[in-house]
Image: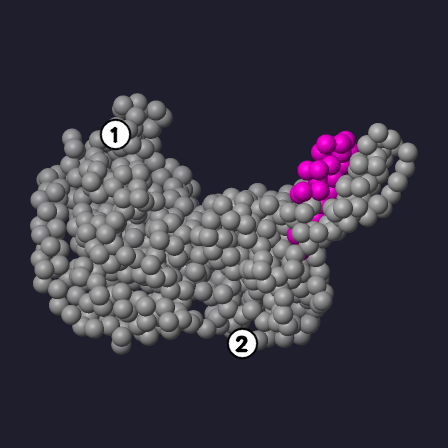
Amino acid sequence: MNRYTVAVLVRNQFGVLNRVTSMFRRRQFNISALTVSETETSELSRITVVFEGEENNKQQLVNQLYKLPDVCSIKELDPDNSVSCELLLIKMKNDPATREEIRAAADAFGAVTVDYAKDYLMFRLSDVTRRIDDFINLMRDYTILEICRTGSVSLEKGGTTIRQVINL
Amino acid sequence: MLLSGADILVETLLEQGCDTVFGYPGGQILNVYDSLYNYQDKIHHILTAHEQGAAHAADGYARTTGKVGVVISTSGPGATNLVTGIATAYLDSIPMIAICGNVPTTQIGTDSFQELDITGVTLPITKHNYFVGSVDELADTVREAFVLAKSGRPGPVLIDIPKDVQIAKCEYTPEPPVTADEPYAAKEVRIQEAAELINAAKRPFVYFGGGVIAANAQEEMLSLAEKIDAPIGCSLMGLSGVPTDHPRFLGMQGMHGHYASSMAMHNADLIVSLGVRFNDRVTGNRSKFATEAKIVHIDVDGSELSKTVHAVCGLRGDVKRTLAALLPMIEEVRRPEWNEKITALRGEEEEYTDRRDGLTPRNAILTLNRYLGENTAVATDVGQHQMWSAQNLVFRNPRRFVTSGGLGTMGFGFGAAIGAAFGTGERSVLVTGDGSFGMCLNELATAVSYHVPVVILILNNGVLGMVRQWQTLFFDKHYSNTVLDRQTDFPAFARSFGADGEAVSTVEELDAALTRAFEASGPYIIDCAIDKDEFVLPMLPPGGSMDNIIVKVGD
């Protein structure tokens, strides 16, 4: 199984996310992360889909996306030629016995302490998905209270943009 | 000019050249029906007995004319009754616009009376759908819907219009009718690849589907087959795409396809697939499907390429344009050896052909054939009668076989036959079974009201024949809920609705009844008794391959 990141530019219209996810659901695509937000123009939104599967599944996913009238352009992002980033917020139990170990690990990963109280610690980490996975795995040795992560956002390197992709 | 939303809707429909719509009124679409009243000299509204019948009628109209079929319903149950019709059109790529009323925008989301999220419901069965939130968007939404419905791979589009949007007024400026997006040929590099593969083939087979009819690419396809000296077969949706008696045509292939057609495809070393899907009913067991064949696949919908079977060369593009670009690169060859094989396969098929006397299903369809004009559209429902029709009907012109191929909708036929009669302006035929007819017979009321000349041939075996066939073959003859044993007197039913009809039990009686039916001014039912244990053959068992084909009972 391979991991693919696909960026999709869509018309910023009511219900568009629903159209995209409904297609994923009915065709049973295995989506591991999905983010959506407005872009440099209010008319367009950008969806980043991280998908696991074989090459032909990925091609089918792209082809099916292409058929949605709200989809303007699609770009598969090559991990070697793009920058990806994900955001994590993690809340840990603040136990004097483990506090220093947790903080040392957070420091090593570059996670920022965003809140601190007697009973809990909260860190923010923005990094690639794998580094975030690693950090969470490390934290499993202690008591994780809550986790919230965003899913990956990605931009291709270089001066061209997804809006210049016209054909598939 | 300042017009209400309802008037703008009708004006934009007229703008698109739409003069016939099918539908059923109700509370939240009343304003549109008031406009239809005012515009009745310009736009003809056909009131059906049920919204589902209206949706199938719009579909049958679209299939026979190539135009966009339009259906109108109210909110809630009116809209849900369209769902099967919309899904049927979606699976067969039929251009259709479904227009629904809805509760006023101020009430949306409050579960008001007959409120329903129909855009949510139809999301997976439309090419696209619209909720019109403001009257200012209405005209352009309708225009965009028409473009979408007929562009590329056609399909249904739904427009949901809340009541207050129908009432609100805005400035309307007429525009010329929209045109479909310009069709384009596949990439040249792919066409080059395809040409090389085709020129290198020894046993090519041309396999086509509804996409060839939609793209009007018959001529180019026949030129290709002629140039490479190849036989032609088709999917269920391709039927009527080439004249049945064309010397290269082997008929439909697949689960109940013609033996020679299926075998030729199985033995080919190259399948040139045109506007067709490789559905499970076509391939059977995919790992054993045409194992020696390379597949060159041209389709306007790129997602069909290598979706179920691998295409060594997939060409995304309009079939007609792509073939036109491909043809000059194709070398003209004769293939005596391959054609000898085809002739031998035809001979084998002859041996398997059912030649029994009496009122067999095949004889019923052959008798019907003699009454069909060049332009007569034949609609079917779904089941054994549909396959017997597909196997034995003779077509001379495209768009004359109206059948639910993808969704397999029982109850599709009568509405579709009515729509086909309006579309062609001629008498249409419905071949149905007693099971299927039971699902749509209410539309006899419509046919009578509008004096629609429809010949209804019911192949009546008193059972749900196709399911029964499977029960016989694969379920130890456990005839669970497939014996109808109903006491319906179809000719009496016809008379009670103001139509006419008769029951027949011999070929001679059927012949005489057809003479009367084809002279009747309105609908005419022929209740044709056939044996309940008739099989549709040949049959490729589900998930089987050509090695398991059943050609005779007892195989």
B523 vs A45, left or right, is: left
Q: Position of residue B181 (x, y in %)?
A: 48, 70
User: To which residue does mark 2 refer?
Assistant: B176
**Which corner quadrant of the image does residue B152 belong to?**
bottom left
Q: Chain of mark 2?
A: B
Q: Amino acid at mark 1?
A: Leu
Q: Residues within 10 Å of mark 2 (few under 14, many from 20)?
A: few
Q: In this picture, is B549 found above or below B118? A: above
In the rendered image, residue B434 lying in the magenta stretch gets the answer no
Q: In this picture, is B468 found above or below A155? A: above
> Which of these two is toward me, B500 or B199?
B199
Q: In this picture, is A52 found above or below A93? A: below
Q: At x 81% / y 32%, what residue is drawn?
A: A98
Q: Residues within 10 Å of mark 1 (few under 14, many from 20)?
A: some
Q: Amino acid at mark 2?
A: Pro
Q: At x 32% / y 33%, what residue is drawn?
A: B467
Name the image colouring. one colour
What is the magenta range? A133-153
Q: Position of residue B186 (x, y in %)?
A: 39, 69
